[in-house]
């Protein structure tokens, strides 16, 4: 499989809490953003990948570009804007990371397609989600792109990666997610996000409801409790992989990259082939996702592993 996966969304600077030599609390800047993390992890796994986003021309933007290029991610889909970079400060005092974003007038939330822009034929899959779908005007633009591509010649992958603290118009956001969930080929969501999106609905019932739409693959992650994946014919649960935990920043994005990478390498990431995904194919995709996520958790920040780090789970 040689098609290109295009991650669509945000690129920003995460500030991760660290302790100084003197014991004081400080923050270390790390390139991040869910879509950025997915793209960079895919690139490190050797999968042809690009990032569709807006990036500032400031020095943080230069760091973001350098991180993509170092990981083998194409940057020719990026817009460079004379606007500031979004800064996201991370708290690791709870089970799930909590973020405070400083993004007024920021570049990444200002992305808009250029008039007449079309995606090249080499793009065979789009991945969307996270805060890129929350803030305007980029949120509406990315949603419109995914909706326009759904049901066509490209796979549409969705991970809502919900940040409730950023949602200002909950009714509008829920309606946007409902439209995307109805047309996405791949839906990946955490149990935490599912509780916010569909309170009281079991994972099995949620998956069943999404199969009433276009979905061919649904995956629900549960952190240390493992992951479950569904196709229209199979249900497979996989345990988490024990690791020496540093933090969980970027773990879900790394899982998403591993899942997409295995599907891509196996030739299953097409609208014709994904609905025929076998049970073993699903199991292998979940396994690689778990491996990539566990290795990320053993590092500080969203620092995904390279293909050479995977050991027996190496892509074939």
Image (spheres, grey):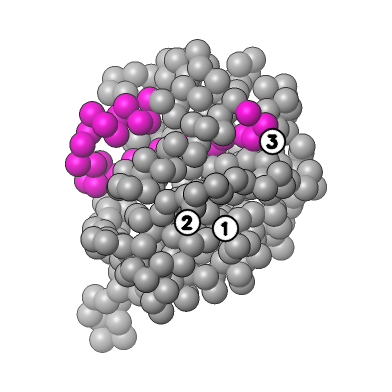
Contact, mark 1 vs mark 2 (Cβ under 8 Å): yes
Residue 77 image label? 1
Name the residue that disc number 2 marks: 53
Q: Secondary structure at mark 2?
A: loop
Q: Which residues are magenta?
A: 152-178
Query: Would residue 87 be found to the left or right of residue 274 on screen?
Result: left
At which x and y percent is residue 114? 49, 52
The residue nearer to you, when weighing 304 against 222, is 304
Q: CA distance from mark 1 to mark 2?
A: 7 Å
Query: Would residue 24 be found to the left or right of residue 190 on screen?
Result: left
- List the single residue furthest toward the bottom: 22
Please rate how many residues cluster around mark 2, counting C-alpha atoms within 10 Å: few if below 14, some from 14 to 19, many from 20. many
Q: Earlier in the sequence, mark 3 or mark 1?
A: 1
At which x and y percent is residue 297? 48, 57
Name the residue that disc number 3 marks: 269
Q: Residue at x 44, y 36 (%)?
A: 144
Q: Residue at x 78, y 43 (%)?
A: 1
Which quarter of the figure has residue 179?
Answer: top left
């Amino acid at each position: 499989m040689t098609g290109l996966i295009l991650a669509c969304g945000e690129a920003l600077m995460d500030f991760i809490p660290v302790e100084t030599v003197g014991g004081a609390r400080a923050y270390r800047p790390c390139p991040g953003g869910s879509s950025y993390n997915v793209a960079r992890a895919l690139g490190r796994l050797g999968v042809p990948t690009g990032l569709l986003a807006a990036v500032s021309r400031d020095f943080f933007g230069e760091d973001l570009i350098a991180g993509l290029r170092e990981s083998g991610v194409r940057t020719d889909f990026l817009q460079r804007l004379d606007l500031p970079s979004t800064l996201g400060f991370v708290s690791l005092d709870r089970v799930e990371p909590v973020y405070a974003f400083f993004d007024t007038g920021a570049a990444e939330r200002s992305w808009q397609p250029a008039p007449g822009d079309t995606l090249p034929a080499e793009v065979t899959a789009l991945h969307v989600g996270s805060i890129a779908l929350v803030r305007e005007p980029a949120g509406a633009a990315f949603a419109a792109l995914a909706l326009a591509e759904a049901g066509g010649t490209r796979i549409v992958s969705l991970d809502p990666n919900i940040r409730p603290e950023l949602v200002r118009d909950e009714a509008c956001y829920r309606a946007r997610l409902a439209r995307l969930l109805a047309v996405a080929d791949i839906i990946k969501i955490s149990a935490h996000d599912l509780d916010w999106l569909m309170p009281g609905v079991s994972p099995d019932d949620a998956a069943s409801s999404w199969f009433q739409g276009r979905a061919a693959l649904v995956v629900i992650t549960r952190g240390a409790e493992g992951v479950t994946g569904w196709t229209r014919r199979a249900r497979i649960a996989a345990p988490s992989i024990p690791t020496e935990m540093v933090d969980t920043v970027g773990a879900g994005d790394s899982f998403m990259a591993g899942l997409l990478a295995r599907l891509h390498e196996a030739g299953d990431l097409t609208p014709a082939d994904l609905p025929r995904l076998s049970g073993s194919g699903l199991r292998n995709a979940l396994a690689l996702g778990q491996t990539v996520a566990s290795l990320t958790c053993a590092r500080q920040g969203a620092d995904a592993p390279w293909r050479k780090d995977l050991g027996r789970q190496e892509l074939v």
